[in-house]
Image: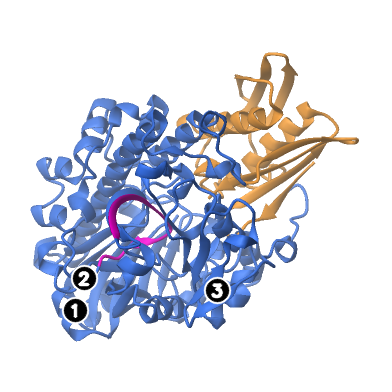
Chain colours: A blue, B orange
Amino acid sequence: MADATRDTSSDRGFAGPLERVDECTWRIPKSYKSGMLVDGLIFADERLIPQLRSDRAPEQVANVAFLPGIQTASLAMPDIHWGYGFCIGGVCATDPASGGVVSPGGVGYDINCGVRLMRTNLTLADIQPVLVQLVNQLLRDVPVGVGQGGRHVFSPAELRMLMQEGVPFLERRGMATAADVALTEAEGCIPDAQPEFVSDRALARGSDQCGTVGAGNHFIEVQVVDRVEDATAAAAFGLHAGQICVLIHSGSRGLGYQVCDDSLRALRDAPAKYGLDLPDRQLVCAPVESPEGRHYLGAMRAAANYAFCNRQLLMWQVREVFARVLGKPWHALGMELLYDVAHNMAKLETHTVNDIQKTVCVHRKGATRAFPAGHHDIPDRYRDMGQPVIIPGDMGRASWVLRGGPRSMERSFGTTCHGAGRCLSRTAATKMSRGRNIQDELLRSGVVARCRSREGLAEEQPLAYKDVDIVVDIVHRAGLSLKVARLRPLGVIKG
Amino acid sequence: MHEIFEHTADLGLRLTSPTLEGLMTDAARGLFEIIAGDLAQIRIQPDSDERFHVSGTDPTWLLLDWISELHAAFELRRMLFRSFNVTIDATGLHATAHGERYDPVRHSLAHEIKAITQHELSVVETAAGWNATLIVDI
């Protein structure tokens, strides 16, 4: 770069109050800042406190507490880290009936970024002999990386139908099964999407990106179940030790980023119009029940449906690669979707607040819905177990399958963590990789990694992330979501 | 002058310049360094010119909208720019950017930028000129 990169992490930490509430919860009292309407509550334990204090994420938790109509507390999950406006790992529920707002920053640019896990009937012994060939073929056939368009190109009219209908649009075209639809959050279609609110620029950015991974922290990973923690739930989810699975992490690509950008631009005058005093421009918002709020939610839902379709087309391409390499049709390989879940979304949901049942707008930014057993929004086959929750870790250690926990509704508006959470900045991770070959290191630990860009592996190396086992341990102990199975990476493609 | 600073998951640009036009030029160069790497190392030929106009008078929104337009030029038309002529008047920012289309044989790409954020966005006039901060979402 033209000028030296400056390490600013030391002067960007959080020195404010963190009061311990219980073994897994820490409070930022609303007295911390004038303007906070509720406390901040962060799920963490002592192991994460030094990391928690090292960046500005807790300050962002406090800032979110300014949002009109916020209910109970501004929440953050243990994978919390510094974001823009909201922290990553943030959860905020607002009450539309009392002027509650919706904030595009509470969803993020990558609307409905999320993960889906596909199980197979393959074992480690089946996959090891062809693993390198398989990962190389995935890299060749599945578009991944900066600037990579896909083979599925949609006209503006087709994109509007896709955004209205979600994954059922692909089912009609033979690129999704009925089971794929049934096992996607909201059956792959958020109702009340308004594609007519999506700009021409967003349509242009999204025309050839449905079915592409992208870059940054997005990936496709071949994994093996290395430990089952809850045999009953694992059996219900169709998982067993030694089984091969595929994890896909991506979102709404350029279309969703542009929808967020357009919405932030449209909301520039909202603070003055609605008398909002916000501590960060990126928290800009409007009442849910306002023309601006309804416009954003309509466009956001359209982008969310695009994201479900993106992950569906990625899964379809992965099935084709496995079939080609292993010489059997994908259905003969048992390549069935376990579940697809969003972790960047705003949804109107029913929750109980102070013993009153009400509809609230739940913002989850880097946080996963985790409804407990019995909830009507969980697919029939999993309802007795709780919603499957899929937590990607890093490419060297582990990922997890959890299930919605018994305390998630009372403690976190039915929410849990979304990943390991970064602990190193991209520049720090790059510096740490100098003189090392991350690809070789991963190979020595049993992971075949392929990455399109020179920066990708360095910035996304395992040490750039917190230990996902610790993060998952906290949400388990807090009762937000419960451990079902741990998965270990075998092969990964990244941008 | 610009420097790229650390943000946990994303990247930021810190800018200083004696003039607002210089600040906008430095921000543009910083953007394409994040996208494509060190501009001194990669060969972007000035084969193509594109003209930009961003209306407005608030320097903060001008910076955001100008860099967002350049980002869109890359996202929609795969344009990489390396030099810029920027003027600012009462109607807004006018610029000509010089560069070429991304060529996967000759160019490498370093980061996919999702968007230019408003988080900690600031443009401040000082006794010595102008300072700005801009964070991009990776």
Mark closer to the observer (2, 3): 2
Residue B129: quadrant of the picture: top right
Q: Which mark is residue A463?
A: 3
State the residue in front, A37 or B36: A37
Visible in this render: residue A478? yes
Residue ID at (61%, 66%): A429
Q: CA distance from mark 3 to mark 1?
A: 31 Å
Residue A398: quadrant of the picture: bottom left
Subunit ID for the residue under disc 3:
A
What's the magenta bit mostly, secondary-structure-wise? Answer: strand
Is disc 1 in contact with disc 2, using a CB cutoff of under 8 Å? yes
Q: Which mark is residue A233?
A: 1
Under mark 2, the amino acid is: Gly
Residue A116 on image: x %, y %: 28, 60
**Horizontal side, residue A112 vs residue A315: left or right:** right
Above/below status of A16 relative to B18: below
Residue B70 on image: x %, y %: 58, 31
Residue ID at (72%, 43%): B40
Above/below status of A196 relative to B75: above
Above/below status of A315 relative to A410: above
Of pointers 2 and 3, the one earlier in the residue sequence: 2
Which segment did they paint magenta? Answer: A356-371
